[in-house]
């Protein structure tokens, strides 16, 4: 099982879509608010400028796309 971290901000509809999907499928993940210091620092380190950002293992997915998420999550590496 790959570790998941979801970076979001309040009132972001795409962030809510990603969160609802992960919850509905029973994925375990850490939710991080991009406006809090820790979230900003982590997103600045990877150069992300839009949300949501989903860290899947060691990979990052910027923006929400269910099909892309499933492909990355289910990939061998």
Image (tube, helix red, strand yellow):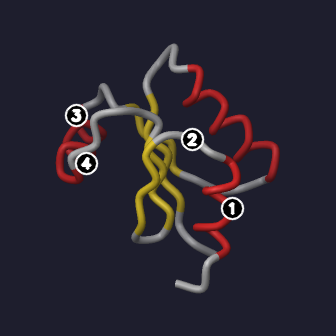
Residue position marked by numbered label 4 in the rendering: 42
Residue position marked by numbered label 2 in the rendering: 64
**Residue at coordinates 46% horizontally, 53% vertically from top-left?**
61
Mark 2 or mark 4: whose residue is earlier in sequence: 4
Tell me if label 4 and label 1 are in contact, CB under 8 Å: no
Quadrant occupied by the N terminus: bottom right
Q: Residue furthest right?
A: 24
Q: Secondary structure at mark 2?
A: loop
Tell me if label 2 and label 3 are in contact, CB under 8 Å: no
Q: Nearer the viewer, residue 70 or 55?
A: 70
- Vertical relation: 5 (above or below) 50: below
Q: Residues within 10 Å of mark 4 (few under 14, many from 20)?
A: some
Residue 43 % position (x, y): 27, 44
Residue 41 % position (x, y): 19, 43
- Vertical relation: 57 (above or below) 54: below
**Residue at coordinates 26% horizontally, 41% vertically from top-left?**
38
Mark 4 or mark 1: whose residue is earlier in sequence: 4
State how far apart marks 3 and 4 are (Cα).
9 Å
State how far apart marks 2 and 3 are (Cα).
23 Å
The label on residue 70 is 1
Q: Secondary structure at mark 1?
A: helix
State how far apart marks 2 and 4 are (Cα).
18 Å
Residue position marked by numbered label 3 in the rendering: 37
Q: Secondary structure at mark 3?
A: helix
**Residue at coordinates 51% horizontally, 50% vertically from top-left?**
30
């Amino acid at each position: 099982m790959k570790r998941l971290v979801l970076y979001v901000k309040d009132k972001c509809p795409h962030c809510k879509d990603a969160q609802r999907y992960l919850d509905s499928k029973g994925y375990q993940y850490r939710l991080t608010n991009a406006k809090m210091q820790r979230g900003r620092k982590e997103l600045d380190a990877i150069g992300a400028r839009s949300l949501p950002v989903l860290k899947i293992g060691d990979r990052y997915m910027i923006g929400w796309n269910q099909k892309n998420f499933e492909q990355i999550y289910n990939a061998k590496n």
